[in-house]
Image (tube, rainbow, N blue to C red):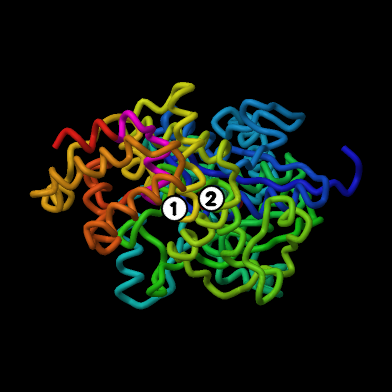
């Protein structure tokens, strides 16, 4: 690897589909790596085996692939710094904790969960600062032996040095300094021998030579601790840190399921295009200038810098995402839109996955693309092309007593010289004029009879695509 290579990482704990905030973090790391010709690493934080299932792991992979955030090193790809699943790196963490314990940076803590909870409660009651009280920090050999003989297991805690200030420059938030008396001795290895996040992430960031740690603001308090671990490991060169602003709901509260969908997979299912989601995520905390909202992936790669990430919380605003989605839908060629609609239509029970299905979708695509904000809005609009649709309640009401009129329309259309939107329109307007009908009165019953609904793409073009024989059959069978 050439010196100076930018190495970034996304380190999801696989617990199902990625939260949009983590997707934003992944995107920024990916953009940074791509912009600098660097390496984007996927590291899976699956040390808490009890919570990790294969499905949850697969969901993470699927989301990242769908977003197009390809990783250069990681599961399924390999790389020189693997393995990339923390569950497969236990020996490395053990080696580090053994060395740090030898050097007196760690100590054994025999306190049980119950004891800790009790002392936390009394500290709380006495309004003392929360955090570990240092009970085991200076045990004598005989005290330790006594605990061991009781059969107690031990965790390993970091011996936070006294009287120091740990400082770093955050690209987004500026200089941050933390006095070590604000950092209680923290656990790096649980009593079952597993490493905590604090340790595993620090060890891996060093081992994987990560140059830029870009992550959510919720982790800003982890940074001084991880700098202490690095220092104890003898690593003094800090990486670049950037802590990204929180995502909030439109009411300013943290994004949560109570507010709406927070998982990337939900947006995929609702028919958002990955290019729209990527564009939107990029804008959540980053801007190029005041005006520009639309960025292709290539433009983002060319323009993205951490220096333009803002500190203010970013509002996750679905209408803006929909607006962008509409934009990207309109950019698709009819063929490309048809391809994207195939799975959505199949999910909605339409036999779209065939040559004929694709042909119909490509034919109707130019009529849809101005109207769609989400792909999932398409199936009800195109259903009529795949077979007769029984009229819905509104359509049925409108059709009452229209049999004779529709027969007349069918007769006129049967005589149209050719079957194009233009001749269809001419014919229908002529019949309407003869009967002295306003356009809406004249056309809505035809729409209802042919499509079963009152919301469908423009009528004349729809009939052209459906074909003369089928149109006449539907008009004449009321
Ligand atoms: N696993 C952490 C998360 O998903 C990431 C930790 C980090 O980036 O250091 O929030």
How far apart, in angstroms, are the residues tagged by discs 1 and 2?
7 Å
Q: In x, y percent, where is residue 149?
A: 41, 35
Q: Is residue 315 left or right of residue 209?
A: left
**Which residue is label 1 attached to?**
372
Residue 97, quarter of the rendered image: top right
Q: Is the C terminus in the top left, top right, bottom left or bottom right quadrant?
A: top left
Q: Which residue is mark 2?
A: 329
Q: Relative to 183, is 132 on the left or the right?
A: left
Give me the residue at 85% from left, 46% from top: 5
Count every numbered label the image shows and give the total. 2
For the residues labelled 1 and 2, say whether their Cβ atoms are less than 8 Å apart.
yes
Q: Foreground: 417 or 467?
A: 417
Task: Name which residue lies at 62% across and 66% down.
Answer: 293
Relative to 244, say whether 267 is above or below. Answer: above
**SS class, disc 1:** loop
Taking the magenta stretch, the answer to whether it contains residue 468 is yes
Q: Which residues are magenta?
A: 457-471
Seen at 52% across and 62% down, the residue is: 218
Which SS class for mark 2? helix
Would residue 223 be visible to someone looking at this image? Answer: yes
């Amino acid at each position: 690897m050439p010196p100076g290579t930018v190495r970034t990482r996304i380190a999801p704990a696989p617990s199902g589909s990625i939260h949009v905030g983590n997707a934003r973090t992944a995107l920024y790391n990916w953009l940074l790596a791509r912009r600098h010709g660097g390496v984007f690493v996927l590291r899976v934080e699956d040390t808490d085996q009890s919570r990790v299932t294969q499905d949850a792991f697969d969901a993470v992979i699927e989301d990242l692939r769908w977003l197009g955030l390809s990783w250069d090193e990681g599961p399924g790809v390999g790389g020189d710094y693997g393995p990339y699943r923390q569950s497969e790196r236990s020996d490395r963490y053990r080696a580090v904790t053994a060395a740090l314990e030898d050097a007196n940076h760690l100590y054994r803590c025999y306190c049980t969960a119950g004891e800790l909870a009790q002392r936390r409660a009394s500290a709380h009651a006495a309004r003392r600062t929360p955090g570990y009280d240092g009970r085991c920090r200076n045990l004598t050999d005989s005290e330790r032996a006594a605990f061991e003989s009781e059969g107690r297991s031990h965790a390993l805690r970091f011996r936070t040095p006294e009287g120091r200030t740990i400082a770093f420059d955050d690209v987004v938030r500026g200089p941050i300094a933390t006095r070590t008396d604000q950092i209680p001795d923290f656990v790096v290895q649980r009593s079952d021998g597993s490493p905590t996040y604090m340790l595993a992430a620090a060890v891996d960031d060093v081992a994987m030579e990560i140059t830029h740690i870009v992550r959510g603001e919720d982790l800003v308090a982890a940074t001084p601790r991880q700098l202490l671990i690095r220092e104890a490991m003898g690593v003094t060169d800090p990486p670049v840190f950037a802590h990204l602003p929180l995502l909030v709901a439109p009411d300013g509260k943290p994004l949560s399921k109570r507010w709406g969908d927070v998982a990337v997979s939900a947006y995929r299912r609702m028919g958002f295009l990955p290019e729209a989601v990527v564009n939107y995520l990029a804008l959540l905390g980053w801007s190029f200038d005041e005006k520009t909202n639309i960025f292709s992936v290539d433009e983002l790669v060319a323009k993205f810098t951490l220096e333009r990430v803002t500190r203010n919380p970013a509002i996750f605003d679905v209408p803006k995402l929909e607006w962008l989605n509409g934009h990207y839908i309109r950019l698709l060629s009819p063929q490309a839109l048809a391809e994207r609609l195939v799975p959505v239509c199949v999910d909605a029970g339409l036999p779209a996955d065939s040559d004929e299905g694709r042909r119909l979708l490509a034919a109707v695509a130019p009529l849809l693309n101005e109207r769609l904000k989400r792909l999932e809005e398409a199936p009800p609009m195109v259903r009529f092309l795949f077979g007769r649709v029984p009229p819905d309640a509104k359509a049925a009401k409108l059709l009452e007593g229209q049999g004779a009129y529709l027969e007349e329309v069918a007769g006129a259309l049967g005589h149209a010289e050719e079957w194009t939107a233009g001749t269809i329109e001419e014919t229908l307007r002529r019949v309407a004029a003869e009967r002295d009908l306003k356009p809406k009165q004249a056309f809505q019953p035809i729409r209802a009879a042919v499509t079963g609904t009152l919301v469908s793409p423009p009528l004349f073009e729809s009939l052209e695509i459906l074909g003369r024989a089928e149109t006449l059959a539907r008009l004449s069978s009321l």
